[in-house]
Amino acid sequence: MGVFTYETEFTSVIAPPRLFKALVLDADNLVPKIAPQAVKSAEIVEGDGGVGTIKKTIFGEGSEYSYVKHQVDALDKDNFVYRYSLIEGDALSDKIEKISYEIKLVASADGGSIIKNTSNYHTKGDVEIKEEHVKAGKERAHALFKVIETYLVANPDAYN
């Protein structure tokens, strides 16, 4: 088994506490409302939302995937860190055992956030993950993030 790590970093005009609430803590409710074409529904299958919880996300009709299940690995509300692993679904191919993610929000000097994202692809055997495959997924995730950010800018009282 190999592990391939990819890191990305981008910025937001939204401060970490507010962004973390929308992006992590309430994403299961918010995203299907504001981006139903991307996510049809999200629900807790097992657990209480904390570490060990398993969630199922059903993607919208335009998506190339139908669903994924992920497990919450860490949730640090004070330091704005969220770690989770994709453990089931058609986004995982026969070459990938799981994908682990870490999202960390850090305050920027202008009052917004720096979003640091690390992805670890755990492959089966000696399979190599192609950069363009990862890039396509990151672009979809970033587009969804921008939808959330736009919602927060347009709704300044939400998630305060």
Image (cartoon, rainbow, N blue to C red):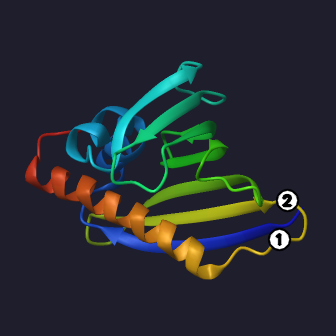
Viewport quadrant of the C terminus: top left
Please report the residue visible at 64 percent of the width from the left and 72 percent of the height from the top: 6
Name the image quarter holding residue 52. Answer: top right
Above/below status of 62 relative to 131: above
**Residue 127: assigned label:** 1
Residue under the point 48% across and 48% down: 80
Asked whether 135 or 155 is in front, the reply is 135
Q: Residue 140 versus residue 65: which sits nearer the camera?
A: 65
Q: Position of residue 37 (x, y in %)?
A: 27, 49
Badge 1 density bin: few <14, some 14–19, many ≥20, Cα 10 Å: some
Question: On the rendered structure, is 49 left or right of 84?
Answer: left
The answer to whether residue 107 is seen in the rendering is no
Q: Quadrant of the N terminus?
A: bottom right
Q: Nearer the viewer, residue 51 or 126?
A: 126
Kind of residue indicated by mark 2: Lys
Q: Secondary structure at mark 2?
A: loop
How far from the left and from the top, in percent, is residue 106? 44, 61
Answer with left or right where residue 68 lies relative to residue 57: right
Q: What residue sits right under mark 2 in the picture? A: 124
